[in-house]
Image: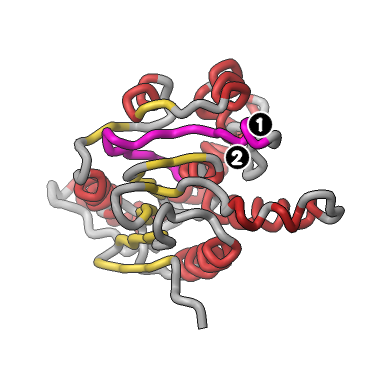
């Protein structure tokens, strides 16, 4: 029996998912499969409102795919199906109906960078480096990087990072909008917990619809997106949480959301 490489802790309404595949937390087949199982669990856990994703130790969030698994794919057909299976797991994290925060606590390369950008918010420790070095192996980002990265930082900058393949610092990543915030080394999880506690005090009914409206609207023509927002806004007005939120405001007290 293999050791578990993806650890899950839950406290209050927050889940912490830690990839623990020393020394550099690479994205092996086992890690991929365990991420799928873990995020299946989190999607169905009505107690969890916010998910934090990080890597164990302080060397790497995830230093990419497990290149030792590559030779068996060279010259083989059927690669597309395997890649789409990987995409399905990254999509599962991207479209989880709950806010997600990635804590980048070291090298965030290749598949690790692609995993980080499936999360809604990224907090980087100042020693972290981010990059997509696949071009140096004669390949290119195949974990959704060519699609997600331009949507986050714009087409020109995304192409530059992928064409050149060199890593950038956490501060450079913040400047181009690839990470939300840079904190001192060792402080990433504290910062993520502060943010997660604040977000988890709000209604998951509203949070999940913000996420859905943004994710779906990004791929829609503007007026179609506005219409989708209106549908979701109507839905949120049918929840128990909206009654609690409005009552609490009128009664000048703090709302206690049931996420229903």
Residue 80 placement (x, y as % from top left):
79, 50
Near mark 2 (Cα within 10 A), the count class, few <14, some 14-19 or many ≥20, is some
Q: Residue at x 27, y 32 (%)?
A: 182
Residue 63: x and y in percent read 47, 46
Q: Which residue is most to the left?
A: 252
Q: Residue 13 got which mark?
A: none
What SS does tag 1 mark? loop
Q: Provide residue 259's location: percent of width, then percent of height.
A: 36, 61
- Position of 127 relative to 162 (above/below): below
Residue 141 percent coordinates (x, y): 63, 37
For the residues bearing labels 2 and 1, Cβ distance under 8 angstroms: yes
Q: Farthest residue toward the top?
A: 156
- Quadrant hosting residue 42: bottom left
Other residues around mark 1 within 10 Å, as few (<14) / some (14–19) / many (≥20): few
Asked whether residue 249 is in view, the answer is no
Residue 149 figure quarter? top right
Query: Alpha carbon of mark 2 to alpha carbon of mark 1: how far?
Result: 7 Å
Q: Nearer the viewer, residue 154 or 4?
A: 4
Q: Residue at x 29, y 49 (%)?
A: 58
- Name the residue: 49% across, 32% down: 131
Q: Which residues are magenta?
A: 119-137
Above-or-below relation of 23 to 133: below
Residue under numbered circle 1? 220
Which label is found at residue 216?
Answer: 2
């Amino acid at each position: 029996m293999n050791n578990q490489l993806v650890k899950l802790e839950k406290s209050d309404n927050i889940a912490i998912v830690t990839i623990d595949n020393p020394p550099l937390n690479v994205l092996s087949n086992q890690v991929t499969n365990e991420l799928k199982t873990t995020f299946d669990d989190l999607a169905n856990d009505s107690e969890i409102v916010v998910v934090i994703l990080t890597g164990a130790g302080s060397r790497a969030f995830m230093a990419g795919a497990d290149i030792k698994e590559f030779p068996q794919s060279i010259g083989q057909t059927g690669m597309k199906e395997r890649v789409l299976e990987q995409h399905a797991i990254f999509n599962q994290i991207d479209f989880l109906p709950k806010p997600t925060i990635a804590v980048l606590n070291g090298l965030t390369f290749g598949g690790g960078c692609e995993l980080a950008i499936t999360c809604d918010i990224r907090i980087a420790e100042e020693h972290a480096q981010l990059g997509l070095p696949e071009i140096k192996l004669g390949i290119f980002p195949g974990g959704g990087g060519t699609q997600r990265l331009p949507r986050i930082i714009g087409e020109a900058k995304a192409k530059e990072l992928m064409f050149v393949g060199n890593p950038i610092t956490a501060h450079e990543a913040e400047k181009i909008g690839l990470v939300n915030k840079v904190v001192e080394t060792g402080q990433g999880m504290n910062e993520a917990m502060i943010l997660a506690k604040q977000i988890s005090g709000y209604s998951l009914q509203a949070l999940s619809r913000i996420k859905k409206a943004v994710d779906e609207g990004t791929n829609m023509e503007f007026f179609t997106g506005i219409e989708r927002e209106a549908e979701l806004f109507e839905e949120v007005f049918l929840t128990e949480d909206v009654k609690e939120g409005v009552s609490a405001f009128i009664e000048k007290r703090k709302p206690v959301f049931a996420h229903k």
